[in-house]
Each structure stands twice: as C-alpha cells, then as structure tokens.
Image (cartoon, coloured by chain):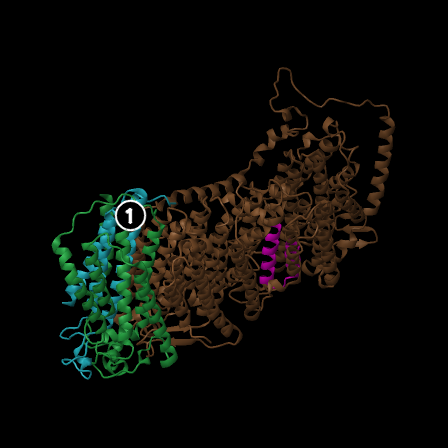
Chain colours: A brown, B green, C cyan
C-alpha cells in the first residue's frame, strides 16, 4: 500500500506548485487541486480496502530516519483509513461543489483548501502530540482563511472570533504539551499513554489542558458561539468540510488523547458531550436560519459522539461500531445538508420548499435527516440500538434518558423542517445548481445507503441481527423508489400483488393470533389499496412510504427478537409518517405524530434494552423470564410505548389530526391498520409478561382504567366534532380504549373480545373512512352540517355508512354485537366494578356520534349546490362493498376467525373460553346464535320497513333547515344550521370532560422548551469577546468539576 | 466594571490552575529519555553540530514542514484578503518625506542584512540560527526597503516563485528521503560529510536553506501585501 | 531561576488574557494575544532549562561524547521555535482580518461585529 505520508505530500506539493502558475491559469490550478485531492482520496480508499477486504494490520510510517518516540510517526489503521477517506473525499467533493468560487478567487484559495484538508488528515494520522498541535493550528488558520470564500460579509467577523478563541486554545494546548513532555520525557502519544501521564507530578493538570484545548475545538456548550457563527456564515461547501471532516478529525484527536488520559477522564468526556448534545438540540428548536440550525445540529451530534467515547470503559471494542456509526452518519448527512443549503436561495427554513421542484433532493434531504435521527436502516440506528443496549446492561439509565431526550428534540426540529419542505409554498427563487453540485450530493446520498448496508452486515456478523436492507419487505418497499416514474395504477397493482403474494408465501408461518394481524396487514392492506386506483398521475412518493409502512408492519409480527421488533416498529413509524404528511393540511399533525411515535419508540427501546441486560440478542419470549425488580419497569416502559401508538388518553393528541387530515385512502390505512400495531405490541407484552406490580400497584389494573377512560373520553370528544373524518378519528381513540380494556382484563374472554375488536375495527373504520372520504371528495367539505340529503345521490356510500355504524355501535345483528356480547361476558366475569361502569357508559355515547353520520350527512335536506353530485368514485365504493360483505359474513359466522383464536388463547388463559356448537356460541352466562339473530333482525326490520313505506306513502317533503330566532343576527352562517353543534346541550353538561387537558399539557411542554431555549440561546450574543469569556468559564468550570470528582 | 471584575475572577481561576501546575513542577536533574537520545545520537546519525537544528529539520521535520506551511497559509490568506478588496485606487495618502539618512543607510545596509540572513540559514546546522531566523532577517531587510520607499512595489511574481519553488523542492527532498533512505525527510539522502564542515550533515543545510528562502519570501510577501493594502486607502 | 521564568511566563499569559477580555479594540486584543504568546514561549523555554548546562550545540567546548551531561534539553527549544512561527502567522492573519473588518464598518470595536448571534 502507499505510504500514508504521501497524503500529506500530495496536498502540500500541489499547494506549493499552485504558486508557480500565473494567476490567469486558474483552470489548470483547479485541475491540479482536484487531482491532488483525488490522489489523497485514492490513497485513503486503498487503505480502507486493505483493512476491510484483506484484514491488513495497522502500519506505522516513520519520518526523520529514526523510530518513535524520537521522531514523528503516522499510524494507519482502520479508523484512520476511514477518517482520512472521509476527510479527503469531503474535500474533493466540496472542491467540485465550490468550483465557481474557487476559480473566481484563484490559486491562493485552492492552496488554502488543500492545506485545510491536509491538516485534517494530519490530525487523524499523527501519533505525536506536538505534531498534532501543528496540524491543529494549520486547520484553524485554514478555516479562518476559507471563511473568505463566503459571499456573506459577516463571515469575516466569524473568522476573527474563531481566531480569538483559537489563540486562547493554543496557549492551553502548548502548556499542556510542554508539561506533559516534562512529566513523561516524550512527545509520542503512545509513549505518554504507557508512561501513564496522569500519575506523574503535574501530569493530571497538564492533561487537563491538553484535553480542554482539543475538546474545545468540538464546540462544547457553552463555549461554542464561535462555531455557530462559522456554520451560519461560511460558504456551504466549506461548512460541509467543517461539519463533516473537521469534527470527525477532532473527535479522533480526542480519542487519541483519551488513550493518554486513561479511564479516569472518560466521565468528563461523557459529561461535556451529553450536556452539549442536549443544550445544542434545545437551542436549535427556536432557530429559523437553516445554516445556523445545521450548526446547532452538528454541535449536538459531535457532543453525542464525545459522550459515546466517554463510555469506552463499558462499550469496549463496540465503541468503534457505535461511535463510528454515529460519526459517519453525522458526517455524510451534514455534508449533504450543507451542500443542499447552497442550492436554496432563501435562508429561512420554509424556503427549502424550493427543493420540491427536484424530488431527488427531497429524497436526499429525508435520507440525511433519517441518518441524523438514528432511524433504520442507517448506521445511526444500529449504533443507537447497541449503545442503549450496553448502557442499560451496565445500569447507566440516566445517560440513556438524556441521550434519547436529545435525539427526540433533534428529530423534532428536523422533521418539522421536512414538513416545511413538503407543505410550504414553493418560493419564487427556484433551486439553482450545477451538475458538480448535484453529484456531490448524490455521492453523499449513495454513501449513506451503502453505509446502512455495511452497518447492517456488521450487525449481522457481530450481534446476529438481520440486515434490514436485506429483509424482503424492506427491499420491496425500496424498489418503489426506483419505480416511482411509473404511473400510479401500475405501482398500485404491483403493491397489491406484492402484499397478497407475501401473505400467500408466508401464511403457514403464523400462529392463530398472529394470523389475524397478518390478514389485516397484508390482505387488509391490499383491499384498502384498491381505493388508491382512484388516484391519477404518478403519485410520487406515495408507494415507497406506504410499502415501507407495510414492511414495518409485517416485520413486526414476524420478529422473534427485540431488535427485529424495534426495527420494524421504527420502519412502520417512518413509513406512516410520510403517508400522513401527504395530506393537504397535515403538516402540524404529521409532526406531532412523528414526535409522539418516536417518543414512544424510544421508551420501547429503553424497555427492551433494560430487559436484555446487555445480551446482544434477546428473544421476545424471554421477556417472560424477567423477574423483580426489573420486570415492572420494563413492562411500564413498553406499555407506555405501545399505548402511544394506540393513542391511549393523554397520549392521544396526535391522532385526530393525523388521521383526519390524511388523504382519503390513507386515513383507512393509518386508522384501520396502523393502530393495530400498537395493539399487537400490547398483546405481545401482556402475553409474555402478564401481570406486573410496581410499588404494590397492579399495572394491568392501571391499564384497565386507561382503557376505560380512553373509551369514555374518546367517544365523548367524538360527539362534539363537526368534521366527519375527525369524528371518526376520535371514535378510534374510544375503540382502542375498548380493546385496551379487554386486554387489560387479562382473562380469556377479554382477549377474545379485544381480538374481535381488532377485526371489527379494521373493517368498519376502514369502510367509514372511505365513505366519509368519498363524500368529502364529492362535496368538497368534511363539515357534516354542510352536507345533508345525500342518500339519494350516494346510495352506496349510505349503505356502507349504515352498515358501518350498526357494526360500530354493537347492536344486533352485525359483528359489533358479537364483540359487545363477548365483552359483557368478559367484564361480568371480572371483579373490576368501577371501570366497568365507565365502559358501560361509553357505549351509548357512541350512538350519539354515529347517529350524526347518517342523520346529518345522508338524511335531511339536500343543499342546492350538491344537487348534481355523483356517487363516490368506483374505486372507493368497491372496497366498501367488500367490507359490507365481510361484515355480514363475519356477523353470521364469527367462528371462522375466532374459533381457532379461542382455542389458541387456552394456552395463555386456560379455561373461561366459549363453547362453539354449530352456529351457537355459549359462555358461562348465556348463549349467542349469530345466525338466528340475523334472521330475527332481518324479519323484524323487513316488516317494519314495509310498514313504514306503506304508512308514509303520501307524506309531504320538508324544505326548511335553518333555525334563526327573531332578531338574531347570524354572523357565522354555520351557527344557524340545525346540525351544527348538534349536541350543544350535552356539551353544557359534559363539556368539562372534553376540555383539551392533554393538548394543553403537551402544548405547555413544547412552549416551555421553546421559551427556555429562546432565552438561553441569547448567551451567544455575537460578541467575540463574550465568546472568550465563555471559553475561559468553560475551562474553569471543567477544572472545578474535575477537582470535585 | 462588571466585565473587568468577571475577567479578573476568571483569570484568578485560570491563575490558580497555573499555580497548581507550577507547584507540581520539579526541574529535571538529567536529560529525559528523548533528550538523551538526541544528545547521544544526533552527531552520529545526522552529522549536525546544532542538535536543535537536527531535531527541527530531521527528527521533527514534519513539524517544521507544518510550520513553513503555517506561514505559507498566512501569506496566502493575506493575499486572498487583499484580492477581495475593492481594487479602485482612491487618492493616495500624502506621505511624510523619508529622511536622507534612511535612504542612504538602506542602500548600504540592505545588502548586508540580506547577506547576514543567508549566512544564518546556511550555517544553521553548525551555529545558533537557521532557516527561520535567517528568513526573518531577510524579511527585515525587505522591511527596511519598504520603510525607505513606502510606495515601492516588489515583484510578486518573483516572491511567489521563490516561495513556491523552495516549498516544492522541500517537499520533494522529503519524498526523496522515503525513496532513498526509508523515511520521510530523512537527511541521509546526501552524504553526512565531515562533522562540523559547512557542507555536511546530509540534506540538513540544503533543507534549512530552502526553509530560509521560503520563510524570507513568505514574510516578504506578507509585508508587501500589507503595505500595498495600505496604499489602497 | 526556573520558577521565576515560569511565573513570569504564566503572568504574561494572564496579562495577555486580561487584555483580550477587557479591551474591545481589535488591535489591542491582537497585541494582548501577542503578549500571551510570549508568555507561553517563556514557559516552554523555562521547562527546557537545566541549571549549569549550555546550549545544545556541539562545538569545541561541548564534544559529542559529553553532550549528555553538558547540554540542556533541546526539545523545548525546537518546540518554541515552531510555536513562535505559528504565533506570528496567526497574529499576521488577525491583523489582516482586523483591517478588513475596519474597512467594512469603520470601527475596530469588537462589539460592533455581532450580527451573527443566537
């Protein structure tokens, strides 16, 4: 392999050579610059290849004719090779990206760029402390110089502030070096490590100065104002280097220093890192300038990696995998995002909506933010999982909490930004870019995915997890990215066939319980997708997102270990987020959905990690073996995590908006199908862990209460809605409450009823959402009071709604009644009286809102503007009719689905099941014969209907529907409509129950965070002198903490 | 006032750390590991009488290359800053006339100063001094020229040629070290010669002279740039 | 002797920092940093000093054979040379930046260059 020193030689030789060219020969100079950077990249890439493919051993390269410690040596090992490749490749791509400005400024700028990249590789490669200092100074000076590339006049001041800070740092660095040299008699890093500097007289203080000087380059809180100014004002091409390459090099320098300092300095690294991570993410919240936001995020990410390095004592060799995964994710994503920021004209976050004109850039953006947020299938995800697993195994719970909190905040502002891109108005100034710039971004994009694959393979190799990018459902979903140019109907057909085929191929794998979910996810998904045939055009982005959600769902029920389960959980979360975001007005709702979901996911992650106690592979079934005192905590974390997805009361505020604002065919998917993921999680949890007690409180009993309250309040909130889809969304909260209640009863019948709810809710909620969506599509509104009398124009939608509400309300003869019957049996057999009363109360309330769907939409007077509307589109009606048929069939023969489950449940709850004899089903309290009921009801209904027709054959038609009192002046037209605020009297009585307490609470949380951040970030007042104060305070505080420890 | 108080209290904190560091300091009685190696082996390994020079140019040659690069960077950036400015020459400042003493003195002194500079870096391996010192002396000669004639324009092309060529040759000599002697910047690519002679110590005098030229050129280019920057006012 | 030099060096550093923290004029800040840099250079040299020994140059008075007992530690001397040069480079750079800043705003007050904040 090529001597690593040639990396330095190539850069310096070229930089000096540039001076020989006349200043007109800028083209030649640019080619030389690119050539030198390519050589550097090529050499590093060669080493990466050698270490990865040929398992080469690390090599030392000597200088000055002697061996270390008497001369300076470079070391090339795997980390060095990867990092130098990262630095030189970023340099090369940024040089391509900055072609215009480099050629405009001439050779000097190119030379400075070359030296900058060279200095970074030097920091990575050198094993000599003073040499490290020299390369640091080179990096600092060239950074200041490259600030001049910016068009922003403020960049100069940022460069000056940086120089002020770095002057102080170099003083500290030199003090550290000279005293460390004095203490150990060597300048060699490895030599100092063996001489154990910390034990020598003055060694600890000397190391303190070294450590602080290098860590301060990572922009730790609060000494990081200068870093933000650089990020905000630098040329985006250089900001990419500064964020991706400089941070990585400095982090590696810290890693080398920690070698000298030893284990006792690790806590300090973690402390500084985690505080920086949290503070920077928090301060980023109120940020509106895109580049400054990227700066905050960069600082946060480096803080996180520093914290991980500080956990080296327990992470051991995994530190390379974890810190490396985080570092590379950060570097690639930040380089990419900074490059994109150069293409966007405006500096406010919503200006990025300009990216919509180029879908590939949107895809790149979302890839990058997924990498930063640690979402699958990128390295950060694997790193996050292993990190939390190991930390939990060692009991470092507080650290996990802080890290996950920071990650959640970061995901919050990143996804908010993504929402702007997708939903905000496209600014007048469009994206301007050269092919070079696009290709730089494209390389970052490709490497992000490639690294995701590599990390997946490594995860498979070392921890026995499956590589997510090899999972067939994921591959299938990602294929749609390549197929996105096809018309929607083709892709829809592929999707439907794919889902069905996957079911056909795998249906023998599932036990009866999972079978229910598999059918709902795969076949149910295919049925809903029929409605998607209604969409015209290409529907860019819909299918990758949908299929990603389905991939997550199906992987969820197929998962056997906690890793697979969690990965699937995150996949379905991201997929559904993209789907929900597609709705016209869904920007804020999609955001609250993703934040709640990720928050829930992090609780699940923590729960799983706690359960595994450090074991790399943990089977879900093994949850059953957990004992006190751990078990109840695991249970609590997992339960809250899953209940976030089922929108249990208190955690429900994301649901109404997310479900109602979604597109017509998306609402049934996220409501009818996605909610079941949460139930599935709860089922798995309760099946394995059963009843748990925490401080003497029976946790399933608490869940019972939550279920009962969700049912009551969900239904109550539903009755006061004017918007048909919102009404249905709130009703889902109530319905999930029933299911939760049933599960929490922890007996045979309770579970049977919950599973019945799973099936029923899928059918009728999908159906109702489709018919409400169809009506909304025709009338152009979702407000029910604007509709009316549609029964004659949209008879099929009416029938679907009618059947649907009969099923929901649980009256005979449809399957809802069956559910209700099992349910009553279940609660009679349990001893929980009070929640039982509440859940009984919730029942009639459901009638109130369901009644409105029929009464206000389909009955009453037809409005003039709707006289000519047609039935909903065929593709909406088709699945509804399928559901009608299914409901009827399920009502007559519930045993088809339930009997096997009933038997299966005997394994978990022996006894207490139902007796299935012919068409009759009996329990300890009575019997239910669906067929007989169906016939009786049909006869009664038929008779009554015929009689009504006969009696009313001469009845008069009524025309009026506005109600206005005398002298009342109706300013808002809807207030005069009889169907508006239909249940006003109930509101007077029960309104206090539906006050948006939860919404207010969560709003309060976000507002507090925002306000706190907005006030605290004023610390960075922009004055270079204040930054010097911050730095010195940081040094003094760090020292005091060090002494205290 | 508050600021001063804050600054003082912070510096008291920093000072306390310094004091702690000083308290723990004990002077060495004998040379430490690294220094001993240099004291014992420099003469035989490099042939240089000045141990500092041997370390600077050979053992820690990479640092020195970096050091030269720092100056190169600084002068490049200064040139860059200058090129960014608005180039319209506004009214030139009225200069105070330069005295007779200075103009006459410079024509005698400048060549001698330059010569001294060259002497210092050529003898860097034998006597105190070397490339940096020599380069700085050369640049001080340039400063004298500038003082006597503030509007004088040096040939940027020449300065930049010297700067780039010496730098490039320096790096190439380093590479020759890898090719011929086994490691970067090894001075034994040339014969070590007789200890104490002007032409001895392998490539050290050559490299140090190049450094001298490069440092001189870099300082000169900074001076020239800075003085022209002022002209623009 | 060494302690006096060390103390002087540290004091110079503190004086330099104090100047940089309390003067808002860019040029004064640069001068302050130059003072601090001199301080650190003194500290480095002081660390290398050994009582009763001479400069690490082999000549008629110090032969290669007795260098081990006669010369002081050469390493700090090498380091200080590098440190000085780097300090000069940075100082020159800061001066040019200050000049440019002055050109843009007509002031040398650092608090006037705070457009980038929060």
Relative to B165, residue A787 above or below? above
Write down the quadrant of residue A723 in the picture. Answer: top right
**Count of marks, rendered view:** 1
- Image position of A35 (left or right of B192): right
Toward the viewer: A1017 or C99?
C99
Toward the viewer: A522 or A327?
A327
In the rendered structure, does residue B134 fall within the stretch colored magenta?
A: no
In terms of secondary structure, what is the magenta stretch mainly?
A: helix
Q: Which residues are magenta?
A: A548-576
- Local crowd at mark 1 within 10 Å, few (<14), some, or many (≥20)? some
Residue C86 visible somewhere in the drawing: no
**Residue denoted by label 1:** B232
Instruction: Provide the secondary structure element on which disc 1 rests.
Output: loop
Q: Position of residue A358 (x, y in %)?
A: 58, 49
Write down the quadrant of residue C48 in the picture. Answer: bottom left
| Chain letter for the residue marked with disc 1 in the picture | B
Toward the viewer: C65 or A794?
C65
Residue A1023 visible somewhere in the drawing: yes
The residue furthest left is B101
Write down the quadrant of residue B153 in the picture. Answer: bottom left
Residue at 76% over, 44% down: A875
Toward the viewer: A91 or A785?
A91
Q: Position of residue A317 (x, y in %)?
A: 46, 70
In the rendered structure, does residue A566 fall within the stretch colored magenta?
A: yes
Q: Position of residue B107 (x, y in %)?
A: 16, 60
Relative to A444, residue A180 above or below? below
- Image position of C50 (left or right of A760): left
Relative to B151, residue A661 above or below? above
Q: Position of residue A366 (x, y in %)?
A: 55, 52
């Amino acid at each position: 392999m090529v001597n690593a020193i040639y990396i330095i030689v190539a850069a310096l030789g070229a930089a000096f050579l540039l001076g020989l060219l006349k200043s007109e020969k800028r083209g030649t100079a640019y080619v030389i610059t690119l050539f030198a950077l390519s050589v550097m990249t090529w050499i590093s890439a060669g080493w990466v290849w050698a270490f990865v493919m040929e398992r080469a051993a690390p090599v030392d390269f000597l200088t000055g004719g002697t061996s270390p410690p008497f001369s300076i040596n470079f070391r090339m090992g795997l980390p060095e090779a990867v990092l130098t490749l990262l630095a030189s490749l970023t340099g090369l791509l940024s040089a391509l990206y900055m072609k215009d400005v480099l050629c405009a400024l001439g050779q000097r700028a190119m030379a400075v760029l070359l030296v900058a990249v060279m200095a970074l590789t030097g920091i990575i490669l050198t094993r000599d402390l003073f040499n490290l200092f020299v390369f640091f100074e080179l990096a600092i000076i060239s950074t200041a110089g490259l600030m001049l590339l910016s068009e922003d006049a403020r960049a100069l001041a940022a460069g000056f502030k940086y120089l002020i800070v770095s002057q102080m740092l170099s003083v500290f660095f030199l003090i550290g070096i000279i005293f460390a040299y004095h203490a150990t008699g060597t300048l060699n890093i490895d030599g100092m490590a063996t001489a154990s500097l910390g034990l020598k007289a003055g060694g600890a203080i000397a190391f303190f100065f070294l450590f602080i000087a290098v860590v301060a380059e990572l922009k730790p809180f609060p000494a990081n104002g200068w870093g933000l100014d650089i990020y905000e004002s630098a040329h985006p091409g250089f900001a990419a280097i500064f964020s991706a390459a400089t941070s990585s090099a400095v982090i590696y320098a810290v890693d080398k220093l920690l070698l000298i300092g030893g284990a006792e300095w690790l806590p300090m690294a973690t402390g500084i890192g985690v505080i920086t991570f949290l503070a920077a993410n928090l301060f980023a919240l109120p940020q509106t300038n895109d580049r400054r936001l990227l700066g905050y995020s960069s600082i946060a990410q480096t803080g996180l990696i520093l914290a991980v390095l500080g956990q080296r004592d327990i992470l051991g060799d995994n530190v390379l995998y974890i810190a490396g995964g985080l570092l590379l994710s950060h570097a690639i994503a930040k380089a990419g995002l900074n490059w994109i920021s150069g293409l966007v004209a405006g500096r406010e976050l919503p200006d990025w909506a300009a990216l919509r004109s180029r879908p590939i850039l949107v895809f790149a953006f979302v890839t990058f933010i997924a990498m930063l947020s640690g979402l699958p299938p990128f390295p950060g995800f694997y790193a996050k999982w292993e990190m939390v697993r190991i930390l939990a195994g060692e009991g470092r719970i507080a650290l996990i909490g802080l890290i996950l909190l920071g990650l959640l905040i970061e995901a919050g502002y990143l996804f908010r930004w993504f929402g702007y891109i997708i939903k905000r108005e496209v600014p007048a100034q469009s994206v301007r870019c050269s092919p070079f710039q696009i290709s730089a971004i494209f390389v970052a994009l490709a490497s992000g995915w490639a690294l995701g694959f590599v990390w997946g393979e490594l995860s498979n190799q070392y921890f026995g997890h499956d590589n997510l990018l090899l999972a067939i459902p994921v591959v299938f979903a990602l294929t749609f990215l390549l197929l996105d140019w096809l018309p929607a109907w083709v892709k829809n057909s592929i999707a439907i066939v794919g889902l069905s085929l996957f079911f056909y191929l795998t249906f023998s794998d599932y036990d009866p319980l999972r079978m229910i979910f598999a059918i709902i996810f795969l076949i149910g998904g295919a049925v809903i997708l029929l409605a998607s045939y209604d969409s015209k055009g290409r529907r860019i982005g819909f299918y990758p997102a949908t299929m990603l959600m389905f991939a997550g769902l199906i992987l969820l029920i197929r998962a056997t270990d906690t890793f697979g389960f969690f990965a699937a959980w995150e996949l379905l979360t991201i997929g559904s987020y993209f789907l929900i975001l597609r709705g016209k007005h869904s920007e804020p709702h999609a955001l609250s959905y993703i934040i709640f979901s990720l928050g829930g996911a992090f609780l699940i992650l923590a729960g799983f990690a706690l359960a595994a106690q450090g074991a790399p592979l943990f089977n879900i079934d093994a949850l059953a073996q957990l004992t006190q005192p751990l078990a109840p905590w695991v249970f609590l974390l997992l339960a809250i995590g899953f209940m976030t997805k089922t929108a249990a009361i208190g955690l429900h505020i994301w649901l109404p908006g997310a479900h109602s604002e979604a597109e017509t065919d998306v609402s049934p998917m996220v409501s009818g199908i996605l909610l079941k993921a949460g139930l599935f999680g709860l089922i798995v949890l309760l099946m394995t862990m059963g009843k748990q007690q925490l401080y003497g409180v029976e946790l399933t009993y608490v869940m019972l209460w939550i279920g009962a309250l969700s049912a009551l309040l969900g239904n109550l909130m539903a009755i006061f809605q004017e918007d048909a889809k919102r009404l249905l969304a709130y009703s889902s909260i109530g319905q999930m409450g029933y299911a939760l209640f049933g599960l929490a009863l922890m007996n045979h019948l309770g579970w049977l009823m919950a599973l019945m709810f799973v099936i029923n809710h899928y059918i009728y909620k999908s159906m109702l959402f489709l018919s409400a969506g169809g009506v909304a599509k025709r009338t152009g509104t979702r407000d029910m009071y604007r509709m009316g009398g549609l029964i004659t124009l949209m008879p099929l939608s009416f029938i679907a709604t009618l059947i649907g509400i009969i099923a929901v309300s649980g009256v005979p003869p449809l399957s809802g009644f069956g559910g209700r019957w099992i349910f009553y049996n279940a609660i009679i057999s349990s001893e929980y009286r009070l929640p039982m009363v509440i859940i009984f109360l919730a029942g009639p309330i459901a009638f109130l809102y369901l009644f409105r769907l029929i009464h206000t939409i389909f009955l009453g007077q037809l409005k003039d503007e709707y006289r000519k509307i047609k039935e909903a589109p065929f593709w909406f009606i088709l699945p509804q009719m399928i559901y009608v048929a299914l409901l009827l069939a399920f009502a007559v023969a519930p045993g088809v689905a339930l009997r096997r489950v009933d038997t299966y449940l005997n394994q978990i709850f022996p006894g207490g099941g139902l007796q299935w004899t012919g068409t009759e089903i009996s329990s300890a309290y009575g019997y239910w014969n669906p067929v007989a009921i169906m016939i009786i009801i049909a006869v009664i209904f038929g008779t009554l209907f015929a009689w009504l027709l006969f009696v009313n054959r001469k009845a008069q038609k009524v025309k009026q529907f506005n109600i206005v009192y005398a002298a009342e002046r109706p300013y808002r037209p809807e207030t005069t409509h009889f169907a508006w605020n239909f249940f006003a009297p109930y509101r007077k009585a029960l309104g206090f129950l539906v006050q948006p307490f939860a919404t207010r609470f969560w709003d309060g949380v976000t507002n507090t965070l925002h306000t706190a951040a907005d006030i605290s970030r004023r610390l960075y007042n922009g004055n270079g002198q204040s930054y010097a104060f911050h730095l010195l305070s940081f040094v003094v505080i760090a020292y005091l903490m060090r002494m205290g420890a | 006032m508050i600021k001063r108080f804050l600054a003082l209290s912070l510096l008291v904190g920093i000072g306390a750390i310094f004091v702690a560091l000083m308290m723990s300091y004990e002077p060495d009685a004998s040379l430490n590991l690294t220094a001993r190696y240099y004291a014992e082996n420099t003469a035989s390994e490099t042939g240089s009488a000045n141990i500092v020079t041997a370390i600077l140019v050979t053992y820690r040659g990479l640092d020195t290359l970096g050091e030269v690069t720092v100056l190169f960077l600084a002068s490049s950036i200064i040139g860059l800053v200058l090129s960014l400015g608005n180039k319209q020459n506004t009214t030139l400042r009225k200069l105070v006339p330069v005295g007779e003493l200075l103009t006459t003195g410079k024509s005698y002194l400048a060549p001698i100063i330059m010569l001294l500079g060259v002497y210092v870096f050529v003898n860097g391996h034998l006597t105190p001094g070397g490339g940096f010192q020599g380069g700085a002396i050369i640049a001080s000669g340039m400063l004298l020229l500038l003082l006597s004639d503030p509007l004088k324009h040096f040939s940027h092309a020449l300065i930049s040629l010297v700067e780039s060529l010496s730098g490039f040759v320096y790096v190439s000599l380093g590479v020759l070290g890898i090719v011929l002697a086994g490691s970067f910047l090894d001075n034994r690519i040339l014969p070590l010669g007789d200890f104490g002679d002007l032409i001895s110590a392998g490539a050290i005098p050559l490299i140090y002279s190049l450094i001298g030229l490069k440092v001189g050129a870099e300082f000169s280019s900074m001076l020239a740039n800075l003085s022209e920057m002022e002209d623009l006012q | 002797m060494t302690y006096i030099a060390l103390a002087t060096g540290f004091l110079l550093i503190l004086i330099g920092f104090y100047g940089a923290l309390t003067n808002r004029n860019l040029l004064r800040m640069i001068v302050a940093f130059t003072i601090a840099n001199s301080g650190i250079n003194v500290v480095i040299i002081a660390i290398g000093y050994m009582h009763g020994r001479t400069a690490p140059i082999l000549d008629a008075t110090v032969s290669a054979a007795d260098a081990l007992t006669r010369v002081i530690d050469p390493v700090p001397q090498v380091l200080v040379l590098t440190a000085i040069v780097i300090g000069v480079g940075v100082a020159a750079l800061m001066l040019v930046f200050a000049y440019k800043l002055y050109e843009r705003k007509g002031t040398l007050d650092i608090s006037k260059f705070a457009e980038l904040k929060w």
